[in-house]
Image (spheres, helix red, strand yellow):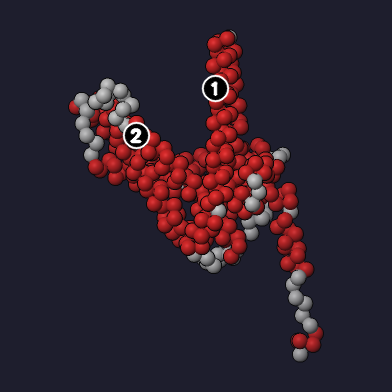
């Protein structure tokens, strides 16, 4: 297998971005997979188990119609909360592990670091990762609250305006959401590698994307569709099993969810979640491409390397 170090800081077009991602994953598959399994794996497994129990509760509630207390949400409210919290934690660890691996690769090259190095890099940047998460989460909640307030206010005053605003918001999100999600993922990479403030890091993603909004939109949408198709294959056994259980419970008036479903749901969720690491790799390569097009840091480094190449001394040749 080719072990030549991949240059991250290089301007790449649409096809080259996907090609370098495949090359990177093939070249580092064993170590990358081990890093995901041993570092992010336990958190993802807990999230997958919590998700399986939540889906089990949801199936039982959907057939019984209510919990023992008469509240449809009472029976699986806690399972949903635990699932959401564990999913958030596993997502943060997954993105941190992926970017920690890529930073180690940039600094040391292929086969020159270990899983322990990736874990160390993740721990070193844990504070930065958490700061990005909490600041952006609070900011997102504030923006959502303001938008919901606007919709409610307009709907109450003039129902037609409220509906039009809601439709305009949905249409706008179809355009803005893919680049926004790209920014919300690579902002962690910027914070980890460039050690800027949270808002400075987010501003950096906007800076490099300037003039490349639609280019980013296309790459994010295409990569999300590709990852989604593969992820659907992983979750298909769970979907089929879940539909069979739902029909069986409706026919029999309820029943307990078998252990086999919990196992299948856990495995499917675990595999589909791990798959998102490939999406983060694509996002990272796109960021480096945009940053290189703007700053030319990689080009200057290669020029300096050429300039610093030792010249053969005539006397040393004899």
Q: Position of residue 4 (x, y in %)?
A: 59, 65
Residue shown at 54% from the left, 11% from the top:
156
Mark 1 to mark 2 CA distance (whole Å): 26 Å
Q: Residue furthest left?
A: 252
Left-right relation of 102 to 305: left
Left-right relation of 252 to 180: left
Circle 1/circle 2 CB separation < 8 Å = no
Q: Residue furthest top?
A: 158
Q: Residue furthest bottom?
A: 318
Left-right relation of 256 to 290: left
Observer-nearest of 147 and 309: 147
Can residue 123 be seen here?
A: yes
Q: Give residue 148's mark.
A: 1
Task: Tell which circle, 1 or 2, labels the residue nearer the N-terminal end.
Answer: 2
Q: Secondary structure at mark 1?
A: helix
Observer-nearest of 197 and 304: 197
Q: Which residue is mark 2?
A: 78
Observer-nearest of 83 and 5: 83
């Amino acid at each position: 297998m080719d072990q030549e170090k991949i240059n991250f800081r290089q301007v790449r077009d649409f096809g080259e971005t996907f090609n370098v991602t495949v090359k990177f994953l093939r070249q580092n598959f064993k170590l990358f997979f081990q890093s995901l399994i041993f570092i992010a794996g336990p958190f993802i497994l807990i999230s997958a188990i919590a998700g399986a129990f939540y889906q089990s509760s949801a199936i039982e509630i959907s057939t019984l119609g209510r919990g023992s207390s008469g509240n449809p949400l009472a029976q699986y409210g806690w399972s949903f909360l635990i699932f959401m919290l564990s999913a958030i934690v596993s997502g943060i660890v997954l993105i941190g592990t992926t970017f920690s691996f890529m930073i180690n690769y940039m600094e040391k090259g292929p086969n020159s670091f270990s899983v322990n190095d990736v874990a160390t890099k993740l721990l070193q940047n844990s504070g930065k990762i958490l700061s990005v998460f909490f600041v952006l989460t609070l900011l997102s909640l504030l923006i959502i609250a303001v938008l919901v307030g606007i919709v409610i206010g307009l709907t109450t005053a003039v129902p037609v305006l409220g509906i039009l605003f809601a439709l305009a918001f949905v249409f706008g999100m179809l355009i803005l959401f893919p680049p926004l999600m790209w920014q919300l993922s690579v902002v962690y990479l910027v914070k980890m590698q460039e050690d800027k403030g949270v808002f400075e890091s987010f501003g950096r993603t906007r800076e490099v994307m300037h003039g490349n909004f639609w280019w980013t939109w296309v790459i994010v949408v295409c990569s999300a569709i590709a990852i989604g198709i593969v992820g659907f294959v992983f979750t298909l056994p769970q979907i089929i099993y879940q539909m069979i259980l739902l029909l069986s419970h409706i026919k029999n008036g309820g029943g307990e969810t078998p252990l086999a479903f919990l196992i299948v749901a856990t495995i499917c969720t675990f595999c589909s979640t791990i798959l998102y690491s490939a999406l983060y790799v694509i996002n990272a390569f796109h960021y480096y491409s945009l940053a290189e097009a703007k700053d030319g840091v990689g080009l200057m480094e290669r020029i300096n390397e050429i300039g610093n190449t030792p010249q053969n001394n005539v006397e040393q040749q004899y």
